[in-house]
Structures are given as C-alpha cells and as structure tokens.
Amino acid sequence: MSHSSIYALSDIMVCKECGQPYRRQIWSKYGRKSAVWRCENRLKNGTKHCRHSPTLKEEVLQGAVMTAINSVVENRGEFVGAFRENVIRVIGSYSIKNMPTQYDGEIEKLQSQMLALIEENARKGSVAEEFDQQYQGIAMQIKDLKQKKLELARERKQAENVQQRVVDMDAYLNRTTCEVREFDDDLVRRLLQNIRVINDELLEIQFRSGIVMKQRVSYFD
C-alpha cells in the first residue's frame, strides 16, 4: 500500500519501541472501512523486530492529538513564551556567536596600509621581495576578513528568516481560537515537532515550541 505525506502524522509520528514511522492504513470489517495507524516496521516484519506497538484508530488518535493541542494553546501565555524563548536561543546562536563588529574598520585599515605600501614602493621604483611579502600578507588578511564578513551576513540573514517565521507563527496563533474544533493537518504541521507512541495508552507529543507532554489515548488491535 502506498502512503502519502498529505497526512501530517505520516511525517511526525514514530514508534517508541523501534523508532520507525507510523503509517495510515484502511481496514475493512463487515463491509465498513475505517482508517488506522500502525508501525511500519511491524507492518513489514510482523512482531520480529517490534512486538508491542499498538494499532491506533485514526478517529481516536486525532482526538487525542487535538486534546493535547487545545490543552497547550489554551494556556497561550506559556505556549507563546516558550516558543519565543526557543526562537531567541536560535537567533542568538546566529547573531552573537563569535561576532566581532570591527570587520569593516579592520578591512578599511588594511586597505589603507596596502595603498600606503604600494605608494611607498612606487616612490622607490622597484618591486622588492620584502614588498611582495608584505603585500601578500595584507591581501590574505583582507581576504580572510571579507570571508568572515560574508559568513556573518549569511548568519544574520538566516536569523532574519527565523524571525519572520516567528512573526508568521504569531499571526497564525492569533487567528487560531483556543478551542480548535477538529483535526487540521496544517495546524498539526505548524505546531508539532514529533509524536512518539509510547505504549497502548500513551503518546509523547513534542511541540515546536519545545513543550513536551504526555497524552492518553484509547486504542484497539
């Protein structure tokens, strides 16, 4: 059976026992079809490498996920605060890690030294070995500083992109009511990092904000 990532849970839900992803299947019983989620490893290999992973009925699973989301989103202050703290740490790693602010000044100073060296050599009217060594030394320093400046610019740009994602997330959260009515794949993708199926009654859900919580769920084999 083929699977599609149109289902958000296909991308984030894994089995705690073996670490393999859960996959959606359609079961048919007494002429009625129902969607269930099962460990991919157990589907392919039976109980050889994964003995205890439960089969989760989609309706019940989605209900448990939305219960978890509602319980966190309802406490909006804690949720947004944790999310922002996490993002600030990410941005901080880009913006202040080994970040000297004197690149431009150092480059200008070295360029002035290079110009003075060239002018002095021109007055002497010859290209001495000492001049060549000094020139190459300054040129290498300038090249190194320009590379550092470029890397810093890239890091700052990446930080700006992260900040924009924060703004987008805030806007999305502000549009989302505290009572989420039904399962929404897009909402799940935006809010959840991963879901681990711990056992037949328990999920461990990690939000992108860094919040981790346990959520109880009913299941059947």
Image (tube, helix red, strand yellow):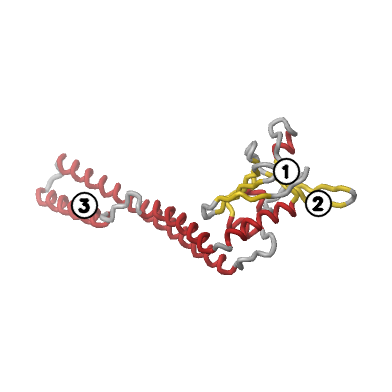
Q: Position of residue 120 (x, y in %)?
A: 12, 51
- The amino acid type, in three-letter code, at marker 3 is Leu
- The amino acid type, in three-letter code, at marker 1 is Arg
Q: Position of residue 16 (x, y in %)?
A: 63, 40
- Drawn side of residue 91 relative to residue 165, left or right: left
Pointer 2: residues within 10 angstroms few (<14), some, or many (20+)?
few
Q: Which residue occupies 33% across, 53% down? A: 149
- Drawn side of residue 211 relative to residue 201, left or right: left
Residue of label 3: 110
Q: Earlier in the sequence, mark 2 or mark 3?
A: 2
Q: Which residue occupies 90% across, 49% down? A: 30
For marks 2 and 3, give the one nearer the viewer: 2
SS category of the residue bearing label 3: helix
SS category of the residue bearing label 2: strand
- The amino acid type, in three-letter code, at marker 2 is Ser
| Whether residue 209 can be seen here | yes
Residue of label 2: 34
Q: Is residue 200 above or below residue 161?
A: above
- Which residue appears farthest toward the left when viewing the image? 124
Quarter of the figure that contains the N terminus: top right
- Number of marks in picture: 3
- Which residue appears farthest toward the right when viewing the image? 30
**Do residues under tags 1 and 2 come within 8 Å of each other at their CB atoms?**
no
Displayed quadrant of residue 178: bottom right
Rounded to the nearest whole Å, what is the CA distance between mark 2 and mark 3? 72 Å
**Do residues under tags 3 and 1 come within 8 Å of each other at their CB atoms?**
no
Say the numbered circle drawn on residue 38.
Answer: 1
Rounded to the nearest whole Å, what is the CA distance between mark 1 and mark 2? 13 Å
Q: Which residue occupies 62% across, 60% down? A: 70
